[in-house]
Amino acid sequence: MDTASSLATNLSPVSPLLGTWKGQGSGSYPTIEDFSYSEEVTFTDVGKPFLHFVQKTRGPAGNPMHTETGYLRIPGDGTAELILAQPTGQTELCEGTLTVDGDSVVLEFRASVMNSASAKQVTSTHRRYELVGDRLTTTFAMAAVGQPLTHHLRSELVRG
Amino acid sequence: MDTASSLATNLSPVSPLLGTWKGQGSGSYPTIEDFSYSEEVTFTDVGKPFLHFVQKTRGPAGNPMHTETGYLRIPGDGTAELILAQPTGQTELCEGTLTVDGDSVVLEFRASVMNSASAKQVTSTHRRYELVGDRLTTTFAMAAVGQPLTHHLRSELVRG
């Protein structure tokens, strides 16, 4: 597909995110040991007015850890939506803001979470994706398993 | 990845679904004209105790229509969960049953739906995937835009 010519107009502000981003991250949470991971995030144009999103992380030994997938929607007026499915049994309806300033693109979301019957209980999350130049910094906080909204993950990625 | 040897034990009952399924479908809904489409559904083992799921449809001219993605979870005791993200702005937490009988595998789900601020309003959905031998039949009903739960889509797929 000729993505360069077909990108939907509403996606222009997030076109710098298109492609695959790779790097390292570190995680912490009150209920677990600190850990580190490698991460890959991909935003793909599928010829429609949204981007497909997929994130994958691996442990230091290369073992698959987390993955999540969904769609980035840019309805306009500085709003953004990230519609996510989690293999851990949650859906996350992430709604928030898109801020573009020079070569900086920032997406920031609070999520409404639903948990399946068999899942650990996540009550809310906060995600931030900050692209400055060629560096994408991601942060993730969550309220889960009885803990209040607490920092969990931070990664620094470059175009892969 | 050697998926044959690594498939998580809980996924054994749904192993016949692994791979890509292709075929034709037809759609109807009280608010729109009847339509037909081609469909591709893929269930992928990623080396974890869930399957990655992606569905894509195209119109008669080959134009991309719908897509959805997420994860199939098989917690046991005849239950199944399909955690879905919709590019149309919905999350669907689909919970239901897995029934295996000879060469028949049936997944049936009711969804709890959340709609983003910019989305058309979907209030509930019902999905059924029936694999008999080498034929996968899918049906989808939804309550949306003021309509009660109403049949919307049916497709017949074979291994692609």
Image (cartoon, coloured by chain):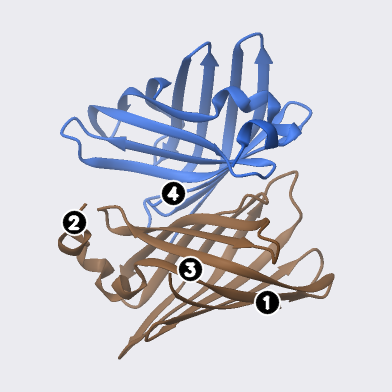
Chain colours: A brown, B blue
Quarter of the C terminus of chain B within the rendering: top left
Task: Give the residue at x 74% y 49%.
Answer: A119
Pointer 3 local density, CA inside 10 Å: few below 14, some 14–19, many at least 20: many
Chain at numbered mark 4: B
Residue that extends furthest to the top in the rendered view of this protein:
B102
Residue identifier under label 4? B86
SS state under label 4: loop
Percent coordinates x, y for residue A1 in the rendering? 21, 51
Q: Nearer the viewer, mark 2 or mark 4?
A: 2
Residue A95 - label: 3
Question: Hey, which quadrant is residue A62 in on the image?
Answer: bottom right
Residue identifier under label 2? A2
Task: Give the residue at x 32% y 36%.
Answer: B57
Q: Would residue A96 be seen by someone viewing this image from the given angle?
A: yes
Pointer 1 local density, CA inside 10 Å: few below 14, some 14–19, many at least 20: some
Percent coordinates x, y for residue A22 in the rendering? 50, 70
Question: Hey, which quadrant is residue B141 in on the image?
Answer: top left
SS state under label 1: strand
Residue A26 - label: 1
Q: Amino acid at mark 4?
A: Gln
**Lateral position of residue A143 relative to residue A11, left or right:** right
Q: What's the CA distance linking mark 1 and mark 2? A: 36 Å
Q: Is residue B84 above or below residue B16?
A: below
Q: Amino acid at mark 3?
A: Glu
Q: Would residue B145 be seen by someone viewing this image from the given angle?
A: no
SS state under label 2: loop
Q: What's the CA distance linking mark 4 and mark 1? A: 29 Å
Q: Is residue B102 above or below residue A24?
A: above
Q: Nearer the viewer, mark 3 or mark 1?
A: 1
Pointer 2 local density, CA inside 10 Å: few below 14, some 14–19, many at least 20: few
